[in-house]
Image (cartoon, helix red, strand yellow):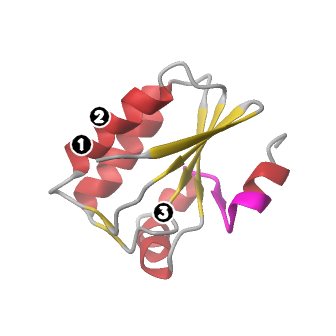
Amino acid sequence: MNLTTEAHPGALIVRVPEARIDAAVAIQFKDAMRAVTEGAPGRVFLDLHRVDFVDSSGLGAIVAAMKQLGPERRLDLVALTPNVDKVFRLTRMDTIFAIHDDLDAALAGQDD
């Protein structure tokens, strides 16, 4: 999976160009996240505006990516589509991750 990144002061934006994070790509997603976030600053924003489907394997891969960052760094989610938002709310993962409506809102609240 080819994730794209954009550096901001104190933050890294990671964009997922795929429509799905599911069992077929979960391992590639997790490995790609490890590669792009290694040495990243304290806050990582995962932009999911193109992702329309996340299954349990994809959810597990996103949680694994958060855990890879360790306790000193934070993974925030940005621009969830309605289907993906529903998965995070139904599984109560919205209590684990900070979820932002869009990138501007996420970057504006960076000092949270």
As drawn, 67 above or below 82: above
User: Residue 35 appears at what percent x and percent y?
Assistant: 38, 28
**Mark 1 or mark 3, earlier in chain:** 1
Residue drawn at 77 percent across, 60 percent down: 104
Q: Which sits in the foreground, 13 or 97?
A: 13
**Mark 2 or mark 3, earlier in chain:** 2
**How much space separates mark 1 and mark 2, taking CA atoms?**
5 Å
Please report the bounds of the magenta region as a residue range.
Answer: 96-104
Residue with the mark numbered 3: 92
Secondary element type, mark 3: loop
**How much space separates mark 1 and mark 3, taking CA atoms?**
25 Å
| 103 left or right, relative to 78 | right
**How much space separates mark 2 and mark 3, taking CA atoms?**
25 Å
Q: Quadrant of residue 22?
A: bottom left
| 42 left or right, relative to 70 | right
Residue drawn at 51 percent across, 24 percent down: 70
- The amino acid type of the residue labelled 3 equals Arg
- The amino acid type of the residue labelled 1 equals Gln
Is label 2 or label 3 in front? 2
Residue contact between numbered discs 1 and 2, judged by CB atoms under 8 Å? yes
Residue with the mark numbered 2: 31
As drawn, 60 above or below 21: above
Identify the disc placed on residue 28.
1
Q: Residues within 10 Å of mark 3 (few under 14, many from 20)?
A: few
User: Residue 85 appears at what percent x and percent y?
Assistant: 50, 72
Secondary element type, mark 2: helix
